[in-house]
Every structure is written in C-alpha cells, then in structure tokens.
C-alpha cells in the first residue's frame, strides 16, 4: 500500500527559523509522522536565517520559476535539505532576506507570494501530496487557491487540505489589494468569503476553504466557539464550520528537551536522580548573579504580551502591589523573553527593585531557556488564553512545577495537585486576576517550604508524563486518512 503523502507548510520551522511555538511544532510533528510511515515533506520561506543552517551549494535544486502577483511577476529559487525531514526552501531575497520574519508593511504581498509559490511548486517536483497541511494565517490562502484557481489541473484534483490555527488572535487582515495579489475578483470581498472587519482575512480563507480545521488542543477548539476566545470568528466556527473543526494536543521534541542528555545545562539528571536538579539551580545562580540563599526560584520563559497574563502583575492584592506581595515570600524570579515595550520596561523595573533576587533577560536564547527550565522550582504561565502552550510541557519535563491559568492547552496538560491522592502535576487557577495568581504561587510556595515530599511528588509526576509527539502524530495520521477518504 503506498504511503500517504503530506506537504507540511509553515512559515517557521525549527531549526531553520523561529519566532514561537509554531516553529517547534513544524520541526517536530513532521519528523514523528515520518517515523510512523508517512511520506512527509516540509516547505517554508528561505529567510536570511536559513543560510546559517544549511549548506547552500549542496542544497540548491537548480529549480527556478515565476509567480504572478497581480501585475507583478516574482522569481523563486528552490533549495532542498533532507538532513532531518525533506524540506523545500522557497527563496526570494526581496521578500525574505530581512532581519525578522514578520511585522513588515508588505506582509500581505510577502505571504501571498509564498502561498502562490507553494501551490506552483507542486507542478515542478516529483511529489504530489494527498494532504497539504497549512499553518496559521500566512498559509491561509493555499486551500482557496487549490480549490478555486487550480481545479482545472488534474494534479490538484485529489489534494485535500488541513488548516491548523495556532493562535486565532493573528488573522492576517489586509486591504482590498490582497485580492489582486491572490488573483481573486471582487466577489471574494463578501462576509461569506474573505471579508472580515472591513478587510480581507488570510486566516478566514483557510477556515472556509480547507477540508478540515484543526487547532492545537481540544479545549481551545471548544473555546474558539465562544465570544471570549473566538476573536470575532466564533459565530463562523460555532454555526457554520463546527462540523469540520477539531483539536489535537501539541507535543514537544523529547529528544531535544531531555534533562538526562541536554548539553546546555550544568548537570544532567532524570526522575531517578532528581536531586541533581539542585546543582543546576545553584550553578545558574552563580553564573547570573542571583543570591544563593535556598529560596524558591520562579521561572518565566515567554513572549512578553498581554496574552501571557503579565498584566496581572500590575494588580493590587490585599492592598499591596502584586510584586511587593510576591517578593514578601522567600522567592526569586528569572524572566527570559521579549515583547511589548510596556512589559519589557516593567521587568527592567523589577530587576532594579529586587537586585540579586531577580534575573531579567530581554532576549530569546535557547540554551539559556533550557538552563532556566533545569534551574527553577516553579514555572509561571498565567495566560489570558493559551491555544496549547509548550512552555509548561518543557517545564514539567525538567521537574519545574507549573502554576498556570486553566485555559486552552494549559487546562489539557496541567492537573492540579491533590494532596490526598498524590495525583497532579502543578497548580491551577481559573479567574483571571492577580489575586488568584498570587494565591496559587503562595500555595506552591507553601508546598515547597512546608511539604517538600509533596513538592517532590509533583515534580516526579510531571517528569514521568508522556509529552512526545507519538500519540498526537497518530491522531494527525488518522485525520489525514479520514479526510483523504
């Protein structure tokens, strides 16, 4: 029986280019699907960052073609690397040779180009997929192009599409020029097609035209049907598209995120040698100038945005500012991440106030992130919403106890500890408030100080859970087969 063929389309993929969790998923899921017997290939833009990761002279396919964007014609060079998973890189320096991946005034044109280039690629390589798996708004037009523009070509007749929402908040909304770039007429500027909030939404194109919509946790799939989390698309999902919407929980790369083998941390350890985690905590404090005083260390590794719940740290709790209340406990905290200016400044201020009880790194450094996972006792993730979240999975893998808000994938992956049954992997709160965030940190602190055996049990429960992609990849493979028919 021939292998099912899947073309996995993402605008960021580990280890080539990354801004967030999408890259981790796109790096790990295809690899696991290949292990399970599928023929999977990945396609992504050739960013400036990619050149540092591949040998360009060996990866050049000597394949070049053009893409029409309204009145423009742009060329594509194709590179190919199969050292991890067979991956195509679509190169156009005008669009992709830039400092960062997203956030430019011409993002509409850049990703319209990418979508059309992906669809055109299929006619030029020896790989016609059964499934094209698209991810987030940047790839949303691909299912539309397959269905409405390329239907005349027999190569596309049997291709089915899956569209995964990693975060509904990002919807790719542009002006009417988006239609011209995609080669679409004005009829698509209607509310039953691509029009949304007065613009043209790339994400909506994926929702309406894909054969199946998927998101990254079962709870988030349900939350998208509500006004609170649906970001204006809730009625569309709830009333029209519910029948083709599902959620499959993300995993992590357990080979990469393994404290027993991680080359970035100070001392390797496992659930059987958990006492060696303390060495990582002590050495981390020495290297980064934190006071080595036996206090509980709280870690945060995140984009610094409203979504991640950092506005809760500006709340008042029992007539005290949240951070004053928190630091009245015998705790330290360390933060790694970049994001909104407001929160970067807030954490700089906290560093100034608390000196050697705080570490603030306004950066993203993968090696440092893994040191923090290995060093911290508690990992904080108080998100307003969280489609899946990978940080809590990595934290538990390293024996850091998560304190999370019960939403999305956090609800699906973290179980509040039960002192009677000794089951559970962390501490959860439901109401979005600084008061409840503090109370749950306080509960974790009380457990750490006064019930160390229970704290140790929570760590072990977390470390021995299965976080890899095997189960989720099986669900994706079953979904692909179901859609293919």
Image (spheres, rainbow, N blue to C red):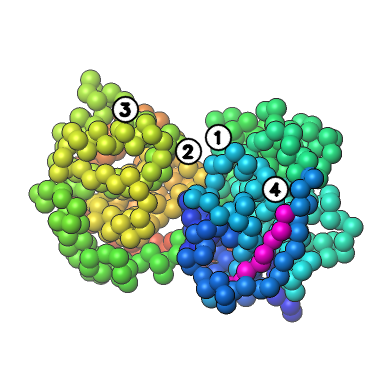
- Residue at the location (54% across, 30% down)? 228
Mark 4 burial class by Cα count in 10 Å: few <14, some 14-19, many 20+? many
Mark 2 burial class by Cα count in 10 Å: few <14, some 14-19, many 20+? many
Question: In the rendered structure, which disc, 1 or 4, sits on the residue that comes first in sequence?
Answer: 4
Measured in 3D between alpha carbons, the distance from the residue under mark 3 to the one under mark 2, in whole angstroms, is: 18 Å
Secondary structure mostly taken by the magenta-highlighted segment of the chain: strand
Single out the mark in the foreground, 1 or 3.
3
Residue 314, numbered label: 3
Q: Nearer the viewer, residue 362 or 28?
A: 362
Q: Nearer the viewer, residue 231 or 63?
A: 63
Q: Which residue is mark 1?
A: 229
Measured in 3D between alpha carbons, the distance from the residue under mark 1 to the one under mark 3, in whole angstroms, is: 23 Å
Single out the mark in the foreground, 3 or 2.
3
Task: Please determine whether, in this image, residue 205 is positioned above or below residue 275.
Answer: above
Question: In the rendered structure, which disc, 1 or 3, sits on the residue that comes first in sequence?
Answer: 1
What segment carries the magenta color?
A: 74-81
Q: Secondary structure at mark 4?
A: helix
Question: In the rendered structure, which disc, 2 or 1, sits on the residue that comes first in sequence?
Answer: 1
Task: Please determine whether, in this image, residue 198 is positioned above or below residue 388.
Answer: above
Q: Can residue 68 be seen in this snapshot?
A: yes
- Is residue 408 shown in magenta? no
- Residue at the location (59% across, 44% down)? 221
Mark 1 burial class by Cα count in 10 Å: few <14, some 14-19, many 20+? many
Q: Which residue is mark 4?
A: 112
Question: In the rendered structure, which disc, 3 or 2, sits on the residue that comes first in sequence?
Answer: 3
Q: Secondary structure at mark 2?
A: loop
Contact flag, marks 2 and 1 (Cβ < 8 Å): yes
Q: Can residue 421 be seen in this snapshot?
A: no
């Amino acid at each position: 029986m021939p292998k099912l063929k899947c073309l996995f389309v993402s605008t960021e993929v580990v280890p080539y280019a990354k801004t967030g969790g999408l890259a981790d998923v796109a790096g790990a899921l295809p690899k696991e699907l290949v292990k399970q017997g599928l023929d999977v290939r990945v396609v992504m833009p050739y960013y400036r960052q990619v050149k540092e990761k591949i040998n360009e002279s060996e990866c050049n396919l000597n394949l070049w073609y053009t893409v029409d964007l309204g009145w423009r014609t742009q060329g594509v060079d194709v590179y190919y690397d199969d050292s991890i998973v067979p991956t195509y890189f679509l190169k156009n320096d005008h669009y992709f040779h830039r400092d960062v991946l997203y956030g430019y005034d011409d993002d509409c044109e850049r990703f319209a180009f990418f979508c059309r280039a992906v669809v055109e690629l299929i006619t030029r390589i020896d790989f016609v997929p059964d499934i094209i798996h698209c991810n987030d708004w940047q790839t949303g037009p691909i299912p539309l192009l397959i269905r409405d523009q390329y239907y005349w070509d027999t190569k596309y007749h049997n291709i089915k599409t899956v569209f995964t929402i990693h975060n509904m908040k990002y919807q790719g909304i542009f002006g009417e020029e988006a239609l011209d770039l995609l080669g679409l007429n004005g009829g698509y500027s209607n509310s039953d097609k691509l029009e949304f909030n007065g613009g043209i939404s790339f994400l909506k194109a994926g929702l309406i035209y894909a054969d199946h919509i998927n998101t990254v946790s079962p709870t988030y799939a349900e939350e998208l049907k509500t006004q609170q989390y649906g970001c204006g698309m809730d009625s569309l999902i709830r009333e029209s598209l519910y029948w083709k919407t599902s959620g499959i929980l993300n995993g992590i790369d357990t080979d990469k995120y393994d404290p027993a083998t991680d080359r970035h941390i100070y001392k390797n350890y496992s659930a059987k040698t958990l006492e060696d985690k303390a060495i990582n905590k002590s050495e981390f404090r020495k290297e980064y100038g934190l006071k080595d005083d036996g206090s509980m260390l709280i870690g945060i590794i995140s984009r610094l945005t409203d979504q991640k719940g950092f506005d809760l740290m500006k709340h008042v709790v029992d007539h005290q500012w949240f951070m004053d209340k928190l630091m009245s406990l015998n705790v330290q905290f360390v933060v790694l991440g970049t994001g909104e200016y407001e929160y970067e400044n807030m954490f700089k201020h906290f560093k100034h106030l608390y000196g050697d009880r705080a570490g603030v790194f306004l950066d993203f450094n993968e090696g440092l992130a893994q040191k923090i996972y290995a060093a911290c006792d508690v990992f904080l993730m108080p998100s307003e919403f969280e489609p899946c979240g990978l940080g809590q999975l990595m934290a538990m893998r390293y024996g850091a106890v998560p304190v999370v808000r019960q939403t999305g994938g956090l609800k699906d992956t973290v179980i509040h500890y039960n002192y009677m049954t000794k089951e559970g992997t962390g501490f959860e709160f439901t109401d979005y408030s600084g008061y409840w965030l503090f109370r749950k940190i306080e509960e974790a602190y009380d457990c750490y100080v006064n019930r160390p055996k229970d704290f140790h049990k929570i760590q072990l429960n977390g470390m021995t859970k299965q976080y890899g992609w095997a189960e989720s990849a099986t669900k994706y493979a079953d979904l692909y087969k179901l859609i293919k028919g």
